[in-house]
Amino acid sequence: MLRFFAVRLLRALITIALVVTFAFIVLRVSGDPALEIMSVDAPPEAIAAFRKAWGLDAPLWIQYARYLLAILHGDLGQSMRDGREAVVVVAERIPATLELTVPALLFSLAVGIPAGVYAALQRNSRTDRAVMVAAIAGFTVPSFVFGLLLVLVFSIRLGWLPSGGIGGLGHCILPIVTLGVGGAAVLARFARGAMLEVLGQPYIRAGSARGLPWRRVIVSHALPNAAIPTLTIVGFMVGNLIAGAVLVENVFSWPGLGRLLVVSVVSRDLAVVQCILLLIAAVMIGANVTVDLLYGVLDPRIRTAPLCAGAGRC
Amino acid sequence: MSTRPFLELTDLCVSIGGISVLRGVNLMVARGEAVGIVGESGSGKSVTWLAALGLLGRKARVAGRVRLQGEDILHMPAPFLDRVRGARIAMIFQDPASSLNPVHKVGDQVSEVLRLHRGMDRRAARAEARRLFDAVGISDAGRRLDAYPHELSGGQNQRVMIAAALAGEPDLLVADEPTTALDVTIQAQILDLLREVRTETGMGLVIISHDLGIIAETCSRVAVMYAGRVVEEAPVDDLLERPIHPYTAALLAALPNVDGPRRRVTAIPGSVPDLVRLPPGCPFGPRCRRHTSACDAAEPALASVDAEHPGRRAACFHSSFAHARAPEHKEVVLA
């Protein structure tokens, strides 16, 4: 078990190192922060001074070595735009993003799973088809289009909800729904598939043959088994949520990490972008490890497997 | 045989997706009787019992009558059937490992039945599950209660299935190919166990199998199925001695003869007919050695062969004892 986690941790570190390296190179090769932040009309001396101050005049590999060394000391650098610690700049945006992503994830789960399960139980009925059509629409329509559509209907036409910005509960609803709808659609399709697969298993019929009422067969025999493959998708969805937040926060002018990321990329505020990417990578790895652990809780067959693999036997 | 049958299937028909897979099955099981159902795959032997217990799902159309102690249960509402299944008629299946839920402990799956059908509380159910595990020969029963199906062998899992079936104290146990997925030594143990349980509880038994040997060992009466109908019904010994239907005779000739003189096993020519396009008349006609033009005109009904042997019935125009020959090997040693 210990070796299992050691391997996972090592893999996670390699992933993070790759993300950091890739971001470092791409950001520096694709634009010049001095020109973006100082503007093109700035006097050449000022630009040279800026480059020197931020160490941008050194060769790329030396910049990279300095950057890695700093990370190992826990120093993620300063924002080039206002000189504050990048970590602080990023950290103050986290609550706003969590305010959207966590409810959006809950919305996806609360809508997607019941819809999928219900569709599977009513297979080939009108309800089933309606749910599936809605699900296909839900994940083919891009979130920025869907978001604008919601704004059009609920803010402009009906005037029920604000079209953007941060404020009370009303401000949250449209962005949360926009962000959560794609996940709900994916989950509905997946939960339906998993449920249909499980309902075809011999133990379902065997349960009925023992006289278990259908409701009980579903709740205590089908659902726990269908939850196992569905969990994988929830793990992936966390990644999609972050990507979605970038779009949705921009559509609704929500002052979260997604907005910060876009602004920082445009102005090549290197330290801030790298800090956000590091955070995203860490969140995704955390989500995957959580999913792996939850597998063990849900599936007794997996609970014993890592032990086996870890011991190098079996 | 007792006067009133425990279970009586009358003209049971099933069609799934527009294809008739059962075409009028008539069958009786007396209280405490052991009946074997034999036939090739696709002959409808499992479907008969799944249909009788209402386990086929919505896609299947079921017609006919299924009388349990005189009461027709076929189209009864689900809550009624839930009190029949597991409590009066239990069923176990071919693949024990996949017939148990992989995420629940085996002890809990047995306790579930005890709490449901016998109203026991958690503690009592666990104690009774343990007693049942002992009774079905699971060693170290106390610890095995907390095992998951993947931690047990196929034979142990089938014992768990039997324990779960016995938990409702049913009057009849339907075992659908109970030993097909198990290796031969375990197969014998499970059959011994089923026989033992029967003598102890007086429970009736239906064994569905493609293996006449298994049925000969455990049952007193046998029904042979072909293309969705019963084609011959007889006491097991009589059937082995003098099969009437040419299909039964061919099945027996296809069995290897272990003790007697060496002989070639004879395969049945052709294959099981496509249920979508059944041949006209007798469905076994095209593969039959005694096929005549009369066989193509109409499908023979299952009928008594002669007055002296009321238990013997066959669905063949050539079904008289004059035609019935013993298979070439006299002593059939089965399984």
Image: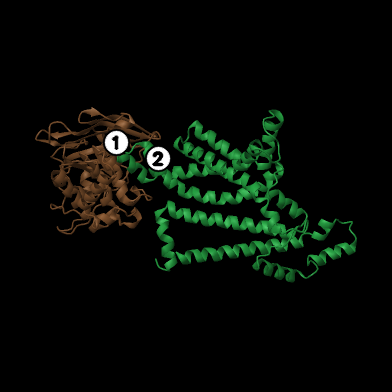
Chain colours: A green, B brown
A148 or B17: nearer the viewer: A148
Q: Quadrant of the N terminus of chain A?
A: bottom left
- The residue most toward the left is B308
| Residue type beneath disc 1 | Leu
Locate the C terminus of chain A by quadrant: bottom left
Q: Find residue A31 and report its image quarter.
A: bottom right
Residue carrying label 1: B53
Chain letter of the residue beneath label 1 in the structure image: B
Task: Give the structural element (helix, strand or loop) at label 1.
Answer: loop
Type of amino acid under label 2: Ile
Q: Nearer the viewer, mark 2 or mark 1?
A: 2
Residue B143: % across, % down: 28, 56
Above or below, B146 against B311 in this view is: below
Q: Which residue is mark 2?
A: A218
Q: Quadrant of residue B63?
A: top left
Instruction: Work out whether residue B35 or residue B141 is closer to the camera in this orientation and state it.
Output: B141
Tell me where residue A18 appears, x and y as whole percent. 64, 64
Would residue B22 be found to the left or right of residue A174 on screen? left
